[in-house]
Image (tube, helix red, strand yellow):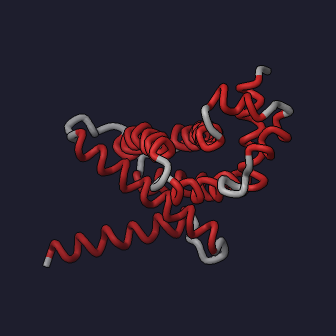
Amino acid sequence: MGHRERLLAGARVCLYERGYTRTTARDIVAASDTNLASIGYHFGSKEALLTAALVQAFEEWGVEIDRVLRDGTQPDLMDRLESMWTGLVESFGSHRPLWVAGIEAFALAEHLPVLREQLAESYTRARPALAAFVLQSGGENVTEETRKAIGSFLLALMIGLTVQRLLDPEAAPSGKELAAALRLIIGAVHDTAGD
């Protein structure tokens, strides 16, 4: 493993153990058994390295969520959504430190344009997969604008669920409870539209 890969691995350890904001360049050097100059040489700055490590960790988490999406083969959309949300909730057990670091990074993105761009790019890649999960078959006539809106809606729910799980895991809804709530909302919309 070269210096670049060791730096990424060390930065990731630091993200999980210390978080984004409390990780120093010296922490990364100690965790990666490299030197301070290699951070500048390979990444330009500690923030760029931490951002690359965070994006890499989210992409690996995304592979796990993709597996959950592929497993969601139930014909009923609400059952698929429940399966997705349940898988997401289960992933918090092993990925909680990643989400803590991610929430820190979201707050910092306002002041770090490269971080904001990379996080936005990862959302851009996630939206179509989430929309395809919802539409599966029968989405041929759906516009790109609507696909983007579907993906954005599901991302908003995922991030909101994440924040609730981080702050108050006992009160945060399960996948089953979210699906039940969405069923009630859809029913209320249909009832209102029928009036």
Instruction: Answer with the quarter of the image where residue 154 lies.
Output: bottom left
Residue that extends furthest to the left in the rendered view of this protein: 195
Q: Tell me which residue sits at (62%, 58%) in the image.
A: 89
Q: Does residue 158 appear left or right of residue 97 in this picture?
A: left
Count of numbered tags:
0
Residue 63 x, y percent position in the rendering: 59, 36
Give the answer, above or below, for where 129 lies relative to 154.
above
Which of these two is toward me, 77 or 129? 129
Q: Is residue 142 above or below residue 41?
A: below
Above or below 177: residue 37: above
Residue that sits furthest to the front in the current view:
37
- Residue shown at 42% from the left, 58% from the top: 156
Seen from the viewer's position, the closer of residues 15 and 29 is: 29
Left or right: 88, with 39 as reference point:
left
Give residue 9's position: percent from left, percent from top. Answer: 75, 35
Residue in view at x 76 percent, y 55 percent: 18
Residue 67 visible to the viewer: no
Q: Nearer the viewer, residue 191 or 61?
A: 61
Closest to the observer: 120 or 151? 120
Q: Quadrant of residue 71?
A: top right
In this orientation, does residue 29 appear?
yes
Quadrant in the picture for the C terminus: bottom left
